[in-house]
Amino acid sequence: MAPRFARWLASTNDVTQGFLAAGGLPGLINLGGGLPAPELYPVEDLAEIAARVIRDHPQDCLGYGPVAGLPALRSALAARFAAPDRPLAADNVLITASGLQALDLLGKVLIDEGAEVAVQTPTYLGALDAFRTRMPAYRAVRMDVPDLDPGPLMAGAAFAYTVPNYSNPTGAQVPLALRQGLVAAAVATGTWLIDDDPYGSLFYDAAPLPSLRAFAPPDAPVVQVGTVSKELAPGLRLGWVIGPVRLIRALTMAKQGSDLCTSGLSQRIYLAALEAGLDARVGQAARALYRTRRDALAAAMERHLGHVLTWAVPEGGMFIWARGAVDTDQLALLAREEGVGVSPSSVFDPFGQDRGGLRLNFTLNPPEKLDEAARRLARALARMRGDEDER
Amino acid sequence: MAPRFARWLASTNDVTQGFLAAGGLPGLINLGGGLPAPELYPVEDLAEIAARVIRDHPQDCLGYGPVAGLPALRSALAARFAAPDRPLAADNVLITASGLQALDLLGKVLIDEGAEVAVQTPTYLGALDAFRTRMPAYRAVRMDVPDLDPGPLMAGAAFAYTVPNYSNPTGAQVPLALRQGLVAAAVATGTWLIDDDPYGSLFYDAAPLPSLRAFAPPDAPVVQVGTVSKELAPGLRLGWVIGPVRLIRALTMAKQGSDLCTSGLSQRIYLAALEAGLDARVGQAARALYRTRRDALAAAMERHLGHVLTWAVPEGGMFIWARGAVDTDQLALLAREEGVGVSPSSVFDPFGQDRGGLRLNFTLNPPEKLDEAARRLARALARMRGDEDER
């Protein structure tokens, strides 16, 4: 008898692995992933900090740590995200090995097979990956619909998942009134509401709107997920969940059976980086660099793609979301042949149906490469339209 | 409506969190966990290595890495575990964020709810935690039964889970004939066979018996799990799975949705430590230190507990497993009152029934503390027996 695998594996995709491997393809300009600009990593600072924290805190860095995270880091994050009228304590914070692990743990404690999950659509591909092993059913929620009442979409769901700030893939913000409406619906229905915020520090015009937690009464079923991947370095694999104590306790049980605890070395490095203001410095440099690149990609798209695709220039985040009357699954394949990696909308749709959108990353590549990428994408588009003309 | 949690949470325990937190109880001598001696951590070497690898490999250490691990580390581990007649390639290796994460990922790809899992019993508590979110049913396999035929216990199971070298909690080795029998049964039934080997480097008399892989034909459904926690430092959170390519591919899909990739910094530190022979040096020091402590605990038990408990002195690992005609759940509570942490057998039984055993760790504490711990445990035992006399 052939060994078997669990059922969810029949529905997997390796798109993310493709993004991460695309760096190895000779000549490919990768606009497909969501990778930061490596020149922003504060290499020398982090080398010095790593050696120092190992010497100063050997037990924290090298031994087993508490399942929920080092108390000093949990306290530091509670202080960072507290507001005068929204106090937070260390036991409102769970340290995770990345924002993605936070989503995996949330899936573990909130989803039983077949439970319904309301997701902002289009949505972060990694969230679909994280929830997949729990085999939920999805309710798609378009957050750009005016006067949307989220109540009926959330009632009876295991949770609602949103990326309110510069959403992945669209780059759009969830409007203020809808943020308030989502929180009110969470309180009214008892449905957990997840605010995944990897991009809040990457704003290029005004600062982002208030987080969902800002509207939530104490102990409301509202959860915020964060990560150091965008504000410092993804290689540390460090993230967090902020939420009611009863949820943090449940997540801690899941964490205990997932990897026991997060790297103490990464935790101590991040704590020292916070104390040195390194995250603020990297954030400022990232905003300046990425603003230029966003504008460069938008200008290149105007030059080469404006006749076929439409888009809004996002106020933050890492992506421009373009739409057009083309099959973007097919376009992404042709684009790769032309030497540019892009992400088709089907992978951001929980039902895999949407074929009219394209996600283009602007953070990884310098302006001249972004221009060349748009040029190559235009060639792929021309080939597709040529194919259509021939039919 | 109150927000809900997934069903598996009703069956959780926080024993492991208790182990990790016990270090904070004033005066408690903690024999309850499986913690290494912190004086073994090569602090200065690792501080120097950490700074160096960040400077030399900033992209590997600080950026996103491949989901399955850095190719250089996968290759190094393939070379380490290959044998002349058992070749291994990088794609037989998955890098994980700890041995426990390897078990979590194996549970994800092999267990559908209700699937039966054959576990060596008593078994590693963390494995039960890792599999719990998948809600398997268990078949208990006693590996100390002479002439056990594992075939019927494995047929139709999702997998069999064993710790053949110095098992947690018993410290016993799975006998050679049974190792061969387990592999033969895996091949015959098509049931995956997991060899979890955190303790293989901690031998105090002879080296351990050959691993299960040594008896497996190429591509057999046999899997080996390893960790750096015992041979270098748990705080790095680094482990691995070695197995057939089709399994590594499935696990990589699960890893993609669990935390995207393992800390590149930890991977580069471990690779540099391997190249410097640091793991071998720490292993040698650990064997010398722990041999003394094992003998000290055994001698202390002879002095204080020999009239009530029986045990075999283990040839390796971190624990002495003692049995007696006492309710060890109750004993563990009284022992804590007397100032010593121990682990009762019920937590190592997939059915939570066994009340006659006790796991005592000897790696964390020096001989004089081990003697005092045995003395305190004897006081707790005397109180229990006194209570019984009064009835």
Image (spheres, coloured by chain):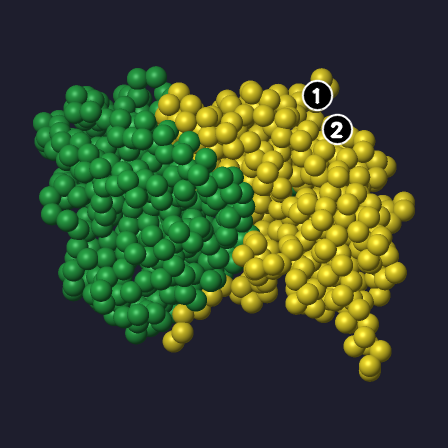
Chain colours: A green, B yellow
Type of amino acid at the residue the image marks with label 2: Ala
Q: Position of residue A353 (x, y in %)?
A: 33, 46
Instruction: Answer above or below: position of B144 versus B274.
Output: below
Q: Position of residue B110 (x, y in %)?
A: 60, 46
Report which residue position mark 2 lands on. B214
Task: Determine the chain carrying the residue at label 1.
Answer: B
x 48%, y 62%: residue: A250
User: Of residues A142 and A187, which is closer to you in this image?
Assistant: A187
Q: Position of residue B255 (x, y in %)?
A: 49, 40
Category of crowding for the residue at label 2, using alpha-carbon neighbours closer than 10 angstroms: few (below 14), some (14–19), many (at least 20) = some
User: Of residues B390 and B304, which is closer to you in this image?
Assistant: B304
Category of crowding for the residue at label 1, using alpha-carbon neighbours closer than 10 angstroms: few (below 14), some (14–19), many (at least 20) = few
Q: Count the marks: how many?
A: 2
Report which residue position mark 1 lands on. B83
Q: Disc 2 vs disc 1: Cβ atoms closer than 8 Å?
A: yes
- On-image quarter of the C terminus of chain B: bottom right
The image quadrant of residue B200 is top right
x 88%, y 60%: residue: B307
